[in-house]
Amino acid sequence: MCGIVGYVGGAEAVPILLSGLRRLEYRGYDSAGVAVLDGGRLATRKAVGRIANLERALSEEPLTGKAGISHTRWATHGGVTEANAHPHFDQSGKLALVHNGVIENHLALRAQLEAKGHIFHSQTDTEVLAHLVGAAFDAQDAESPEALVEAVRVALRQVTGTYGVAVIHANVPGTMVGARRGSPLVLGVGRDEHFLASDVSAIVAHTREVVYLNDHEIVALRGNGFDISTLAGTDATFQISRVEQGAEDADRGGYAHYMLKEIHEQPGATRDALRGRLSREEATAKLGGLNMTNAQLRDVERIVLCGCGTAFHAAMAGEYIIESLARLPVECEIASELRYRNLPMARGTLVFVISQSGETADTLAALRECRRKGHRVLGICNNVASTIARESDGGVYMHAGLEVGVAATKSFTSQLTVLTLLGLLLGRIHGLSCAEGMEILKALESLPDLVTKTLEQESRIAEIARKYAHARNFLFMGRQANYPIALEGALKLKEVSYIAASGHPSAELKHGVIALVSAETPSVCIAPRDAVFEKNLANIEEVRARGGPVIALGTEGDGDLAKVADDVISLPQAPEYLTPLLATIPLQLLAYHIAVTLGRDVDKPRNLAKSVTVE
Ligand code: F6R
């Protein structure tokens, strides 16, 4: 996590750095800082908390200069303090460095440097790297841009772990050096100015010409040019790409929070995920980005779906959806587990990695591990041109649009939409008849309207939220494809309200969790009219028998459910493979309204970051 922005050119650096940092705040918001070079003078400002606090510090004590680096932090090593905020400095105080990633051998390196008399002012791994680069720079005779590049190279050869870094030195004005391994870094090419950032969104307002740096590459940027080389010291080949995405409008559009806006954007997001992907002529889905022919798809014998957090919940729901539509074995794996697991994967296994940001470190590592083993890995990403999208063998974009709220909402339902499309496509290859395909296709076409209809429940859900907002613990339950939705509902509530919540397969409650049921612990039960409705009803009775309040999600007009539940939220009539997506929406709204009732910071919950770029 953490976000980096650097600038070198003819304009004042601070406004450019701040506007870039604001775009990267999704990567962490524990603290922020800048260091700016004004001729040979290096000055810094830092603040704990949001970028707004740094802006305040800079308005009280402004900085000028035409080269600078900046950072927004998600704490890994060392608490959330000003001392631990980036940039960090070397022993001489003349070199400043910002870092995204983790230096794994920082303790050993710190001990070596301390033995040589280095004094550290923070508990971070990053400060160790700053000292290492500074020491390598000071050990050389020259104080040139080349010497700074060489110092970065020498230092990075000594570290293990991951990094995206940007470095400036008071004695090398007008130059900034960047390097990456495992953490994204993109170079922005402007006219007489250059940028460095963790993500194009930070610089796209200034330039659309970018170079995505590869791992083990080092770049030296000046106002009038740049050089890219490798950690080994050879020249690197690179390509300047044009970014099509604009500086997407990130305003709240009249909503109180981005999370609420994004929940309400789901009819449009599902429509965009479907757009141009349904073929009535062939009664199937068309997913050209998979880069696979129907004959190749026919040879797929097993699918692995992989992701983290909410994306993993989408994978779990996808397992049920694809298995039921395509009758293909599907397994889902948590990316952080898959990357270190020696999962037996037979020939014929097709891997999908699911990631809204396309930058999640564990998901990226899982992708690389599976590709290394020779498997074809496809991505289901939202962020176009993200690292995962670029490194996969193909895939399907979600087209959910910019998601700012830290709690994933519309990206999740877009993921489910894409997975249902995949189920239809594979189903039509593996056994669904034309008539069956057409029925699914028509149901998918009606999906955006069903989402709109589900959103009409909001005022009822807000009432329920106020009724239960002060509970200390919530249980969520569902069966089959609604079990992952129970997990997702619990995750949303935890994230934005900080209330303890857990999701369970409904029938599992009696194997232990039912001990938590009490008058103070509401249970949210997903029980649409499906093949397991009666079973769910029985589980609800078990909760009621123990005095637990029940909030039930059921199919509209369900009188049986109304008799057993304290509160009912209606879902529109829909085929079984679409109810998980529809059931998600009330749970998002429930979490949102509970968090608002409790006065939580909904869009930036404590301790979280939107994109998790460390393992
Ligand atoms: C939850 C949430 C996280 C992400 C997870 C994966 O609301 O946002 O659990 O789903 O960090 O992120 P991506 O999808 O960007 O790989």
Image (cartoon, helix red, strand yellow):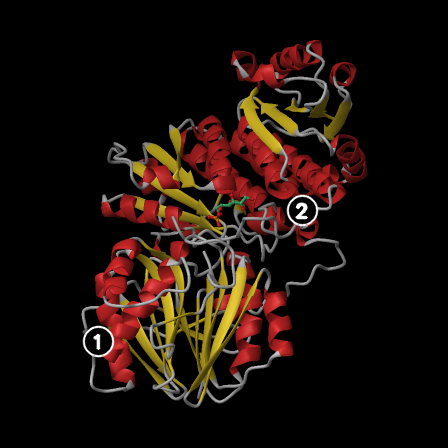
Whichever of labels 1 and 2 marks the residue nearer the N terminus, that label is 1
Quarter of the image for residue 482 reads: top right
Residue visible at 37% across and 83% down?
A: 175
Give the quadrant of the N terminus. Answer: bottom left
The percent position of residue 208, horizontal first and vertical second, equals: 48, 75
Report helix, strand or loop for mark 1: loop
Taking 405 as reference, is 249 above or below it? below
The percent position of residue 224, horizontal first and vertical second, equals: 39, 89
Report helix, strand or loop for mark 2: helix
Taking 210 as reference, is 369 above or below it? above
Label 1 to label 2, Cα distance in Å?
A: 47 Å
From the viewer's perspective, is 561 left or right of 360? right
From the viewer's perspective, is 24 left or right of 470? left
From the viewer's perspective, is 344 left or right of 602? left
Instruction: Name the amino acid type tagged 1.
Output: Asp
Residue 439 visible in the picture: no
Quarter of the image for residue 505 reads: top right
Q: Which residue is mark 1?
A: 235
Instruction: Name the amino acid type tagged 2.
Output: Ile
Quarter of the image for residue 211 reads: bottom left
Residue 532 versus residue 474: which sits nearer the camera? 474
Taking 556 as reference, is 312 above or below it? below
The percent position of residue 80, horizontal first and vertical second, equals: 51, 55
From the viewer's perspective, is 348 left or right of 429? left
State yes or no: Cβ of the residue under disc 1 lies below 8 Å from any atom of ligand 1.
no
Q: Which residue is mark 2?
A: 263
